[in-house]
Amino acid sequence: MTSIKTILIKTALIKAAPIKTLALASTAALLAYGSAQAADLPLKAKAVEYVKICSIYGAGFYYIPGTDTCIKLGGYLRADVTLYGSSAYNAPAWAGNAGQKNRLANNFIFRSRQDINIDTRTATEYGLVRTYFDATFNWTSGDAVAGGTLGVYYAFIQFAGFTFGKAVSQFDTPWTGYPGNNTSFLIGGYDDVTGINQISYTAQFGNGVSAAISLEDPSSYLQSGLYNTSNPGLTAAQINAAYPAGVFGTNSYAGVAVPDIVGQIRVDQAWGLFQVSAAAHQVRASYYTPSLETSGHPSDTWGYAVQGALSLKNLPTGPGDSFNITATYSNGATRYVIGGVSPNSFAIYGSSGIPGVYQSIAFGGSPDGVFGGLNNIVGTNIQKTTAWGVRGAFNHNWSPSWSTSVFGSYSSVDFNSNATALISTAFGSPYNPDIRIAQIGAITRWNPVKNLTFSGEFMYTYLDQANSGLVVLTAPGATKPPGAIYEYKDQGVWSGNLRAQRTF
């Protein structure tokens, strides 16, 4: 006889069987569904190419996603220190407190700079469309423009041979003001490394031969002084302080009416480069008395500049060695010789061995021209200044990581007899404003790794002025004592530069 306990157990097992079966069936169904879904998925997802390399225009270019335009980002970070100069980038102590050699001058001038450039290129049925932008962020200490500054070097569009915007002048060479130097103050030739606004057209004739014509804005870089020696608006003290600083009157340049007209013919070959450039520059004064238009003004006149340039590559002295040189002449367009970043005037003080003489001095200016008069009845025409210069460098590679450049320049600024008479009358004594400036220097670079450069540079600048004897300066300015006797004497100054630069 079956016990009641046994019957209850069997009944429970019978009732539980459908639940267990249902659970097993459900699990099997889920596994089957999961297997079906897994079969639909790829075994490994392919990498998505968000940025595509653009090899058409060289290394570093990428396609902007979703477009046919290629873009390249670049630049450099640079740290500079100038030793015994007058401003950043190894400017000689040839003006201001540095030229006076007083205790207000800074012997160490530091600048840190970040440069960023953006290059875009698009192929079209009309040819390549290119835009280029280059900006710098600077922090300078010890300089006249100390503090943070933003600079826009280049911003231009190129299309079908035309260039619109801020670019290197068509007058200039590919190495601009740097045939082999770090300093921005190697004069003796043209220099607009920071670009100049222009509309230009370049034609390519094949075999490396090209020609260009350009309309360029002279207002920022190419207008040197245009001095009215009658000094309207200046006090006697200001007049006496101006001339020993090489400022020969009231600067009376008018606004730009016509841009500079520039032309260039160039030959690029494996052996190097040959280039001839020319520029026409309007010299346009404001008024004889600056604040009075009824006083009249001198007639406008035209100045000009011409330049020949030669670069030789792959010299017998070693792989990668080169020699760059320019020769420039100007009449009424002095900036094409003295350079766009250099001062319009120079004043260097030194010692004197003559008893009773306080110090020696050499000073001079480099204006485009001078004139005199308070109105159009007694006023003169513009007397244009002529200038010429030679500048060059030899660049030698000792090894893949060490190189040296030896560079130099010679510049001359000359005034005609009428201009000299106007300046002498205003100065109060006979004075010959002609000057010569010679420069020589060397730089050695070390590249321990790619795109990292450490360099050291020194330069000697010599100012040769055309006067002799003694002069009393009633108001020499800055810290120099008024009424002291000075000796006219040629002067020389040393300057140096240390630089670290990482390019990317």
Image: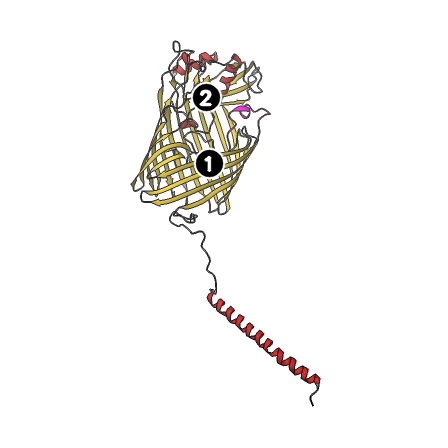
Q: Residue at 57%, 77% (x, y): give it.
A: 21
Query: Residue 365's mark?
Result: 2
Residue in the foreground of this view, choosing between 474 and 253? 253
Task: Say left or right for 492 vs 263.
Answer: right
Secondary structure of residue under mark 2: strand
Q: Residue at 54%, 73% (x, y): give it.
A: 28
Secondary structure of residue under mark 1: loop
Query: Residue 181's mark?
Result: 1
Q: Position of residue 349 (x, y in %)?
A: 53, 22
Quarter of the picture containing the N terminus is bottom right
184 lies above or below 51:
above
Residue in the foreground of this view, choosing between 200 and 483? 200
Residue range (magenta): 91-104
Residue type at mark 1 is Asn
Whole-Å distance between the Cαs marked 1 and 2? 24 Å
402 lies above or below 433:
below
Q: Residue at 44%, 45% (x, y): give it.
A: 72
Query: Residue 341's mark?
Result: none
Confirm whether the magenta stretch covers residue 481: no
Res 200 quadrant in image: top left
Task: Say left or right for 88 vs 422.
Answer: right
Res 140 quadrant in image: top right
Q: Position of residue 295 (x, y in %)?
A: 41, 12
Residue type at mark 2 is Gly
